[in-house]
Amino acid sequence: MRSGYHQRRREVPAHARVVVEPGRWMGEDDPVAVIDYEPGRLTRIPAATQLAVAPDRVSDHVLRPTWTRMRAGEVLAAAVCLGHPVVSRAPADGHVTMVSRRLGYVYVREALGLVGAGAPPVTVDVFPDMSLPKPVLHECLLVREGDEVRFGQALASANAIRLWKQTFAAGKAAKSGESCVAPVGGLVERIDLDRRTITIRPKETASFIAAGVPGRVTAVNQDGIDIAVHGLRFVGAYGTGGEAVGPLSLNDRPESGTVWVRSGRVTMDELVAARDCGVVAVWAASVTYEDLRSFLGDRPLGTVSRAGAGPVAVVSEGFGEFRLSPTVTEALRGLRGRRTLVDGATQLRAGAIRPEMIVIDEEADKGAMAGRDSSVVKSSSADDWPTPGTEPIVAGDKVRCFSGKNLGLTGRAIAPPRQGQLESGLKTLLVEVVWADGGHDVVAARNLARLAPAAERGGQGHGRDS
Amino acid sequence: MELPSEPPVGEGPSIPSLTRWIIAVDVGSTTTKGACFERRDEGLVLRAVEHAPTTVEKPFEDVTIGLDEAIRRLGEVVGEKFGTGEAGGSGGKGRPDVTLVATSSAGGGLQMLACGTTQRFSASSAHRAAMGAGAIVLATLSPDDGLSLAQKADLVRDLRPDMVLMGGGFDGGEVPSFIAELADLLRTARPRPRLGDSFRIPLVYAGNDAGHELVEDVLGEQFIIHRVANLAPGPRKENPGPAREAIHRLFQQHVMSQAPGYGKLLARVAAPVLPTPGAVAKAVDLAAKTWGRDVLAFDIGGATTDVFSVRRGRLARSVSANLGMSYSALNVLQRAGLDRLLRWLPGDDATAVTAAVANKTLHPTTLPETAFELRVEQAVAREALWLALEDHVEMAGGGLSDGPGVPLVIGSGGVLSFAPRQEQVVDILADAVGAGRAVEVAVDDRFLLPQVGALSTVAPGLAVEVLERHSVKRLATVHGRGDKR
């Protein structure tokens, strides 16, 4: 575990409008970026032809930089041809998104304004160009009245192959792959096959991205917004899901909205109970592969887990039957109720990312606000994850084991490494270790990480003492 | 590991420009393996073989740290100071009497994004082509995937793909609108590479002609665009071969070279750093030529398994980018299935087996301490080799020789080279080739095949000698076992 300021990044979509600047203090729910609109259809403008210029010169004539909003009909590019002005106009409200110098095209992305609660219903025409009979039109529908639909979701699909099974005429009329999409997210209020329309009652759409954690904005760039948050960081071995924030709980039973810590192995029943009662994240010492596999269902369990892929669950030691160190458990008990962030993102291969938990110290934030020390820890979770076998071990070193029954144990090397043979028959360098609970073992040097340098920085608290 | 005094190999005339010491290092995804040769008046002597963990991950993120550690250990064994940065070739900073040659597969494992017109047609063709090239497909995107542009952009940004494959649209005609949509999506999402912030992600374009112009135009600065023949040139036609080959090539040329510290490594070596599979391919080809027989070789690493075959003089090679002993152990379990794994582990508890496999994935540099852990690793190896040979036959058209004579099967990689008993290696390889064929099995027990390949670029004569005397140890002639292929 490491105390200090830790950097979190809020990624923002390219079309979002950033509303903060470096140095600003943010509350957890404060917006860092606003999304005014959703990107809609992409329209190609044959600008080289319209302007009578060479394709590679089109970009010289485009008047609106990319991502600049413009209204339908506004001039987006202009030239002079035979002494007369010629222009290309925006076909819809939107922005220039791409200019192809080879083809002489300008692409305009339509901007669909986001609606709030109480907005009027939106009616969509279903395949107005096709003369599909009513039963065939019904066959094309992908939604029913009462369904909730997302922006851009297909409402109906005219698949010629499928429709040919209905009648030859229907198949002929359909344009294969043609689909009718929802221009706005909401509830399907009415489907009128006589009028060939679908009416959607818009639903309020979140239109800002919140800071997520209390902290200070340290950087704003095209990749996102960096926020420094003060707290105590714990690094785990493997996680699933994205990021979640809630008060820290070490109770025996899961509580809604909390980050629930289990000091031993978390079972499938506990994971399900946690999910069902609305726990935002589970942090446990271990889990069995079978339980995690069953809990995740179809989601992949591999070298990479990512945000937005379901509930957040992290194991700090590994798979099997392990416990958190008493030191770590005690430290966490003292922090019960604190706002805690858990990020389950994991990448085990090169460019490693390990899951992490930050118990937020809001008092320290206020101190830094008042001008006290606020230097940001730039290290990532993987920096605090020791790699076994990378540093030579000498007698007296504090070590942590990463293999077999001793996985997660910390102890002290009591003799210099010597060549020897493991029970597996492998010949390698062996180290004699006394564990924190007084136990004693001989372990492959390759399976031990030296903790001494980390201890000097403040200690590698993850791991178990016995 | 100090080696007993051995007869010198090679002759001076073939290496007039080489120095007294030659250090050949293979930077693997998990382990950096070094071999130290000394030139003496009478020839070249293999003095030591030493390994160190590869330091591609945080907190190190520099493969030369592991390299220096391996070189330091070599120096300790031979009584020389090959300290940090001292062993070098052309860089000028290194000891002038040391030549360093290297191969690398650090940063291995391939994750791809597949894109196409519709989920049912070209997107699924792209998905199959990427899978066929041995990649994990992180997502398959198309206009009908049910996601909005903003959702897709978020997804693409989260995924950190190593490479993108874009297909779709029949040849001839205009730029299909979905190509413009996908181009705009990738441009907007700015997917970040897994390795190296300045790295440009390779994009294999296997779509219609006109779309290529647009893709090159708007994504050329952001991606390394590589155009290949259309994946689906017409209705009901699929042509995945060129896309697969391009994926293989780009993976080796671009993705692996993004391992942190790779640039520093390049500055210190006497010859270009060969991708490990390329170096092993040279060595296997050399073995087939030297011994005049067909050869099948496996190189099983932490993240990837490479298979090479030479049949009647034709070399074929494949990379199964997600079959391996550590980083990819869970993938082996998931692809093979627990039942197949357990058939090699009678009497062992299934939960303990899966925990051992999963923990090896979490802690990839660890060694098996107990007999149980070793059994599990060897079971994973059997399944990984079985699957990798399946991929090899399908992807590269290679495989075990069907001609007269007994083919040679060579195994390389930690799980084989470090196996405590040679019978275990014989068993693993016999099970991997499958029942019904007599084969001679051999092991590269000092991990020297990549070095043989690397040496062949600066001293071909020596490479043959090292291959014959030090690298390939022939173990037994056996009948293949296990399932029939």
Image (cartoon, rainbow, N blue to C red):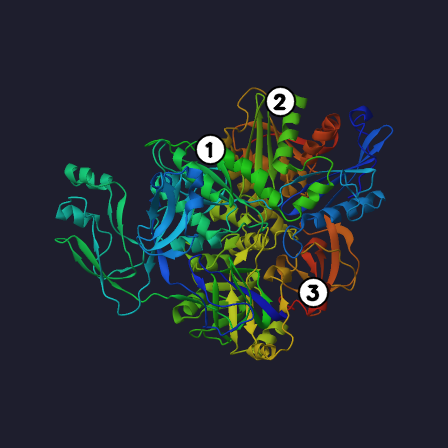
Local secondary structure at mark 3: helix
As drawn, the label of residue B228 is 1
| Nearer the camera: disc 3 or disc 1 | 1
Whole-angstrom CA distance, mark 3 to mark 1, is 49 Å
Q: Which residue is mark 2?
A: B293
Asked if the residues shown at circle 3 and circle 2 are in contact, with their CB atoms under 8 angstroms apart, the answer is: no
Asked if the residues shown at circle 1 and circle 2 are in contact, with their CB atoms under 8 angstroms apart, the answer is: no
Residue A121 location, x and y as percent? 22, 63
Residue B354 location, x and y as percent? 53, 53
Q: Crowding near pointer 3: few (<14 within 10 Å), some, many (20+)?
A: some
Amino acid type of the residue that numbered disc 3 sits on in the rendered structure? Ala
Q: Which residue is mark 3?
A: A454
Q: Left of A285 or right of it: where is A270? A: left
- Give the residue drawn at x 58%, y 31%: B308
Residue B460 location, x and y as percent? 72, 26
Local secondary structure at mark 1: loop
Amino acid type of the residue that numbered disc 2 sits on in the rendered structure? Arg
| Nearer the camera: disc 3 or disc 2 | 3
Q: Crowding near pointer 1: few (<14 within 10 Å), some, many (20+)?
A: some
Asked if the residues shown at circle 3 and circle 1 are in contact, with their CB atoms under 8 angstroms apart, the answer is: no
Dots 3 and 2 on the same chain: no
Q: Left of B6 or right of it: where is A333? A: left
Q: Crowding near pointer 2: few (<14 within 10 Å), some, many (20+)?
A: some
